[in-house]
Image (cartoon, grey):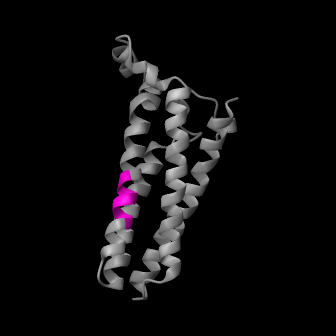
Amino acid sequence: MNVLLVIHSWLRWAVIITAVWTLLRAIAGLSGNKAYAAGDNKSSLSFMISMDLQFLTGILLYFIGGWAENWSGGQIGAVMQNAPQRFFTVEHEVMMILAWIIVHIGRTVVKRANTDRTKHSKSLVYFLVAFILILIATPWPFRAGLGFHSWFRF
């Protein structure tokens, strides 16, 4: 079992927990018309840092684990016809990189917003979109069609 894969798999929970924490703070801030507090900033920073760590381990896995090799030697056509290989070679990476970019853009936009309400609403929009992409692109154990053993990923 690849240690890096286990770390990447367990880091997903840090991403999910910090995302939910950030989204709940944004919802509470909007519904209660609250000031954008230090806790709001800490939650979004934690979300971004967990995404950065996950991104780093994912990039390492992509190249060390051999997924990047699927692009060479004219085999990408066969990879695209195989759902599990396509998922781990293209789909997972594209959606997660988009989510990572959205989190970074969102954090910048929120920091530059003028009012507390705008900060909360932009937090909700950007981080919710990123969170939805993350949930879609995660190889959950119930997605058995991806062809992996899920017992160590959960």
Residue found at x 60% / y 53%? 13
Picture coordinates of residue 44, whole percent (x, y): 47, 68
Relative to 106, does residue 1 appear above or below in the rendering? above
Give the overall secondary structure of the magenta segment: helix
Q: Is residue 112 above or below residue 62?
A: below
Q: Position of residue 11 (x, y in %)?
A: 61, 49
Residue 16 picture quarter: bottom right
Q: Vertically, is 47 above or below 58?
A: below
- Above or below for 71 versus 47: above
Q: Residue at x 64, y 30 (%)?
A: 149
Horizontal side of 74 relative to 18 (left or right) equals left
Q: Is residue 119 magenta?
A: no
Residue 148: x and y in percent read: 59, 28
**Which stretch is magenta?**
101-107
> Which of the 4 image quarters holds residue 35?
bottom left
Which quadrant would the N terminus be assigned to in this image?
Answer: top right
Residue at horizontal 55 percent and vertical 63 percent from the top: 18
Residue shown at the point (57%, 49%) measured from the top left: 12
Q: Nearer the viewer, residue 131 or 47?
A: 47
Number of labels in the image equals 0
